[in-house]
Image (cartoon, rainbow, N blue to C red):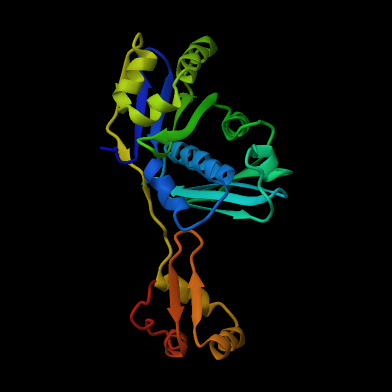
Amino acid sequence: MAQHDQLHRYLFENYAVRGELVTVSDTWKRILENHDYPQPVQKVLGELLVATSLLTATLKFSGDITVQLQGDGPMSLAVINGDNNQQMRGVARVQGEVPADADLKTLVGNGYLVITITPSEGERYQGVVGLEGDTLAECLEDYFLRSEQLPTRLFIRTGEAEGRPAAGGMLLQVLPAQNAQADDFAHLATLTETITAEELLTLPANDVLWRLYHEEEVTLYDPQSVEFKCTCSRERCAEALKTLPAEEVDTIIAEDGEVDMHCDYCGNHYVFDSMDIAAIRNNASPADPQVH
């Protein structure tokens, strides 16, 4: 029986270092199921999903985080959006031939990694880093070093478990304002690096931690569920329609008989006919939802 997606936090008793372990296979599947992405793009979305989940877990507030890759390569955009409840969604845009063995640099071309943190209350923050590293994990470690000044290591694994695509990862980070020794952190990172995709994607969290750190004292906290959840809704589409010029909407209605709004993230369609549009303009609620 496959486990559902979970995020586990853990702490080392004898070191000022904390860790996280996540599996996101079901969520990854949901993100991919409405799209026909080339294999390398699917893999990058899986890695981005792992990274975003691990990053949202490092935040100390309620809000959301968006991690996106953009560039002039065949994959012009790949983005995952998640929140502190570990509700995730994502999408990619492909506009060219993707070689079957394309790596990150080939996919993105000249580009960068943009991390946007939006607290429920307070200022929005955006960090941008060039793609210096060869892997997404290296680029994110670079981001942490520049923005947080906290030594951080990410270990992302994708593969197959029980015959289907699976993705997971681990994060180690020095606790802020603590006197962690660089040697200790390097020692723990060296241990963590040995985790195989098969172990990470098939074993329960406590077994993974035992395999890696059986000579250390580790406290494992209760897990948090990770799930695919899209924030689109008929109401949000209606609000968006209000902001469009009336002539534009009327032209679409005249030509197509309806306005069909499609969500890139989840594939839902929200359909509005002329009566719905009239109701929206009168600030009434749109007629009964038509979701396909």
Is 61 in front, or is 136? 136
Going by the image, does 286 lie left or right of 38? Answer: left
Q: Is residue 227 visible?
A: yes
Is 18 in front, or is 223? 223
| Residue at 53% from the left image edge and 45% from the top image edge | 42
Q: Is residue 74 above or below residue 143?
A: below
| Residue at 40% from the left image edge and 68% from the top image edge | 233
Image coordinates of residue 13 in percent, x first then y, are 34, 15
Q: Is residue 10 above or below residue 254?
A: above
Image coordinates of residue 104 in percent, x first then y, are 64, 38
| Residue at 43% from the left image edge and 18% from the top image edge | 16
Q: Is residue 41 above or below residue 277?
A: above
Going by the image, does 57 lie left or right of 116? Answer: left
Image coordinates of residue 276 in percent, x first then y, are 42, 86
Q: Is residue 68 above or below residue 284?
A: above
Is 201 in front, or is 178? 201
| Residue at 51% from the left image edge and 88% from the top image edge | 257
